[in-house]
Image (tube, grey):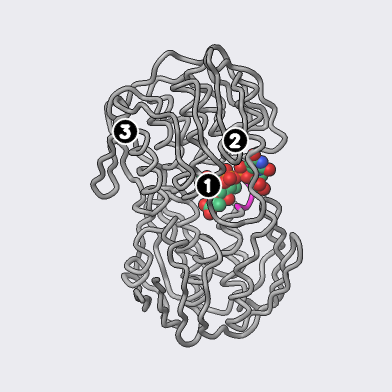
Amino acid sequence: MQKLVIEGGKPLFGEIITQGAKNAVLPVLAACVLCKGTVRLANCPCISDRYASARILTALGARVTTEGSSVSVCCDDADSPNIDSALMKSMRSSIIFMGALLGRYGKCTLSCPGGCNLGPRPIDMHIAAMKRMGAEITDEHGAISCNAPKGLTGCRHSLSFPSVGTTENIMLAAVCAEGETVISNAAREPEICCLADFLRACGAKISGDGSGRIVIEGVRELYPPKDPFEIIPDRIAAATWLSCAACAGGELLVRNCNPAHLEAVIPIFEQTGCRIRVFGTNIYIHRRERLTAPETIRTTVYPGFPTDAQAIIMAPLCTARGTSVFVENIFENRYRHTEAMRSMGADIRAEGKVAVVTGVPALHGTVAEAPDLRGGAALVCAALGAEGTSEIYGVNYIDRGYEDTERLLCSAGADVKRISE
Ligand code: EPU
């Protein structure tokens, strides 16, 4: 078991380079199943969810080679359309292989995916979408068998909610399906555009990504782009480093990010009194004084405030002057970090969708368990600004989405150690 031991109260000075986006690399890795030849990817984050995707690809018969942030995938000899339940349970994104495998083989067998416990995370929209495209799907004791003996056929999907994963699964199923697929009320997240860019670079015909109405004309085959395809920067990791500086104080330059992807997040930091400057692909943050509570934060789909940044931005607001209000509209159970924050002295009341944070003058160190990936990252942020020592367990959650957490923070002056027990 590992823990992060954090000595709080040390301001951050320096710079942190943003990793590639977790939620972009995972669907792109699944998309490799549809490509003939070797796909080369650059700027892939070194995180455990990426390794879980690589294990799934290897189990399917693919050859995966990695060198730091570069990954090559060749699925030419892959012949299995099935993913066993242990691999499916290793992360939520395993479900994205459904569309890719159906697109390649016209069949697959898998089970319900794992992932962080953020409340019920059903896959009904994924299943309904594959059925609309001609797949017969049965669920026997948790084994989900999908069959489209005549292949998938393009159709119109009008999503009841702009689900990120469902949009990605439909895109993967549709790129090599017969005819045209239209997704109305599609997710507009930057990670959707990254997947569309990758598929287009492989020869797919896709338009409208980023707009809420995506149109895909099926093609026969996909071939890897000549140059390595670069994964976009991780907007939530960038927001996390900003929040670390907002908690600990100091001056930090978050480099190699895309500030346009953080348009709903940057103004919140500004409202709290942090000085923010954007230079090209860099964001500078300076926190000198006690922060002030911002306007109500309502999580919603992109381009609104991301649910993945909710816990992270709550950390600095625990010690802000005034009362901050959060409304979580995407997941039912995304306030599990508040208990650990309370053990640090925070005054937080959370009920249903709403959390009310009344700023206290200071937090103190604690021993706590990361409840999930972003909740764990939020505890790290809070511990950096707290007085005394914190021990954060459940590091495996944090490692799902963050590369080199302690090294990056220490390079900016934090005192964070990883200890194996
Ligand atoms: N939903 C359904 N049925 C479905 C699919 C989704 O009811 O078949 C519901 C979910 O239960 C949830 C809402 O729709 O309440 C949003 O789910 P969505 O499908 O958009 O999310 P996801 O694809 O499961 C991705 C990210 C999450 C991020 C959400 C929302 C990946 C691998 N995960 O999840 O990222 O929070 O979109 O933006 O892309 C994280 O990085 O920590 C993380 C949880």
Query: Front-most of 330 and 320?
Result: 330
Please tell me whether mark 2 or mark 1 is closer to you in this view. Answer: 1
Q: Is label 1's Cβ within 8 Å of ligand 1? A: yes
State how far apart marks 2 and 1 are (Cα).
Answer: 12 Å
The earlier-in-sequence mark between 2 and 1 is 1
Q: Residue at x 58, y 17 (%)?
A: 154
Q: Is residue 302 visible?
A: no
- Looking at this view, name the residue that lies furthest to the bottom: 388
Q: Which mark is residue 211?
A: none
Task: Please give the residue where the numbered disc 3 appears in the rendered image.
Answer: 62
Label 2 Cα neighbours within 10 Å, binned few <14 / some 14-19 / many ≥20:
many
Q: Which mark is residue 166?
A: 2
Q: Describe the element under mark 3 as helix, strand or loop.
A: loop
Q: Describe the element under mark 1 as helix, strand or loop.
A: helix
Q: Position of residue 102 (x, y in %)?
A: 50, 25
Q: Residue at x 37, y 69 (%)?
A: 409
Label 1 Cα neighbours within 10 Å, binned few <14 / some 14-19 / many ≥20:
some
- State which region is magenta: 302-306
Q: Quadrant of residue 255?
A: bottom left
Q: Which mark is residue 92?
A: 1
